[in-house]
Amino acid sequence: MRQSLQLMLVAAAVSACGGSGGSGGAQPIATTPGATPVYVIQGNGPVSPFEGQTITTEGVVSGDFQDNDADDTRNLGGFFLQGGADADLASSDGIFVFDGDDPAVDVDIGDAVSVAGIVTEFFGETQITAGTVTVRGRGTIQPTDVRFPVAATLTNSDGEFIADLERYEGMLIRLPQTFTASALFELERYGAVWLAQGGRPFQFTNQNTPDIAGYRAHRRGVAARTIVLDDGRRAANVTPIQYLTAGTTPAYTIRSGDQVSGLTGNLRFARGSGGGGMETYRLMPTTEPLFDTRNPRPPRPAIGGALRVASLNVANFFSTIDSGRPACGPAGADTCRGADSIAELERQLAKLTVAIDMIAADILGLVEIENNGDAALQRIVAHLNATGGSRYDYVATGVIGDDAITTGFIFKTDTVALHGPPAILDARVDSRFDSSRNRPALAQSFVLLSNDAVVSVVVNHLKSKSSSCAEDGDPNVHDGQSNCNATRNRAAAALANWIAVDPTGSGDPDYLIIGDLNAYLFEDPLTTLKDSGFVNLIEMHHGTSAYSFMFDGQAGALDHALATASLVPQVAGAIAWHINADEPRLGDYNLDGGRDPDLFDAETPYRVSDHDPVIVDLDLDN
């Protein structure tokens, strides 16, 4: 039996505790002749059966997101209207009413109103474009509890799995469970935080062997427990940034891994502010969320050991300013990356110097540095030495390969010295190592001045997952390893064989592989290296909860440190220092998109990159 909402012209309560999306609601009688109940307009599918038609409906305002009213923090150009419930669990009782930039009638939460207008599907969300809005009295709507993980998922227009919340679209809902902030990449531009019930999600192949069916089930499972918390605004890049400091502790700054409970708001289907961002169901809060710190910023790392080796992705450090014209790379024909101005370069150098100083590595492998004949390395070393403290030098290699970025080493001259020249692995050494896809591997042996012990370190940056290698016969097979897995795996096999012949001529079996291997813990390249006798130190010390990078709301270890068997007993500890992956990117050096420059803190290492540095402490034997 379908029911509609009774609008009272005096103060009255109208309950929608369950609504069509869950359980029962009020059983009033319509008072507006010819009014169509909201649940009938919504129907029991993703598209309204009344699309394009002019209708009249009624209900209680459950969320006030009008523009140009007293509340300037919630501006979606309209309000959410909720009516009574029916017996169809697939039909929603709520709907968004769009009334533009300058609405003729200012409504408040609890107003009982009738609306006449045209039913539209606005990028997948059922709405009413209001012609007239009439306030008829007062009422109340209670939020419907929605628990995660939800029973079903669906795919959006981009083919991504999302939680199926269609039956709650437009309704006032409450999330009674605790949610974890799983991704912050939409925070600055769209004012949104991805949330996951049941704890932080991890990449499938960080905890499972690659598998097509398993990966698909994993994606569905993550989607079923994920929702996006939005700031309830139409504009992008709004300041101040919502949720950045919305915590329960003094001087709070949000990080992935922090938690929030008791969220209440209206549910809508949309992309982010301005039409960008993930197409999914978003919660527009009607009460202010407060996050609890569950993943505080880590202090200066202290593991212990006589020698510290680390790797750090420097987020495309280019000493050449990116003017937008092709001017970089060995041939001078590549688009430059990194800083777009002197101001950005100074910010990048300042934060990088702080991070390197706090990492305090005797040997530091750098990833994503400009491939310009050591000039970028020289710039970093000069800046470090100008600040005082330890004196650094760099391993001179000149141009390596033909990519715009490369790898390199800097080291403390008061603790270690070079032991022979560097060695480079590329396709000329082993055809399995495709150096048109992977950056060439760079090996250097060092001697510890305190006891003359020798260790050799190989810094790497294997092919990324972001672009396809299908033209090389290496497609994405959708088992969790993404693009170019075979390319990386062949490079890993070549790397293992190369190290076995002691390419630097050190005469010592102690080798350490570091850098960005672009492979999670259980992926083929890591398996190949482990099968060749290398031990993954991050996995050994932290198990499958190890991570150094966040992608698509899931954590995983892309940056690694793998030791030969002879070196493992000399390892005092190993960590991924979580100063980057969990931080919103608004803390980096960029000034793009009209970013507030005061968000940048040059005195902290946080968000110096998007990858966490990996640190290994060693007590080397003679």
Image: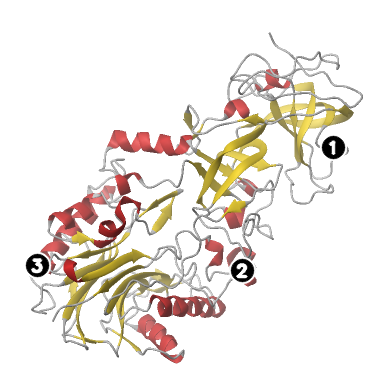
Look at the image and tell me in which quarter the C terminus lies.
Answer: bottom left
* Mark 1: amino acid: Val
Which quadrant of the structure image shows residue 357? Answer: bottom left
SS at circle 1: loop
Distance between the alpha carbons at the discs numbered 3 and 2: 47 Å
The label number, if any, that marks residue 218 in the structure image: none
Q: Is residue 290 something one can see in this rendering?
A: yes
Q: Which residue is mark 2?
A: 599
Q: Which residue is mark 3?
A: 500
Q: Is residue 341 left or right of residue 510?
A: right
Query: Badge 2, how many Cα within 10 Å: few under 14, some, many 20+?
Result: few
Look at the image and tell me in which quarter the N terminus lies.
Answer: top right
Query: Badge 1, how many Cα within 10 Å: few under 14, some, many 20+?
Result: many
SS at circle 3: helix
Image spot of residue 233 (x, y percent): 69, 48
Using the image, determine if residue 38 lies above or below residue 592.
above
Image spot of residue 201 (x, y percent): 42, 45
Of all residues, the one furthest to the right in this rendering is 10
The label number, if any, that marks residue 107 in the structure image: 1
How are the residues colored?
secondary structure
Q: Is residue 186 left or right of residue 328?
A: right
* Mark 3: amino acid: Ala
Image spot of residue 239 (x, y percent): 69, 60
Task: Give the mark nearer the N terminus: 3 vs 2.
Answer: 3
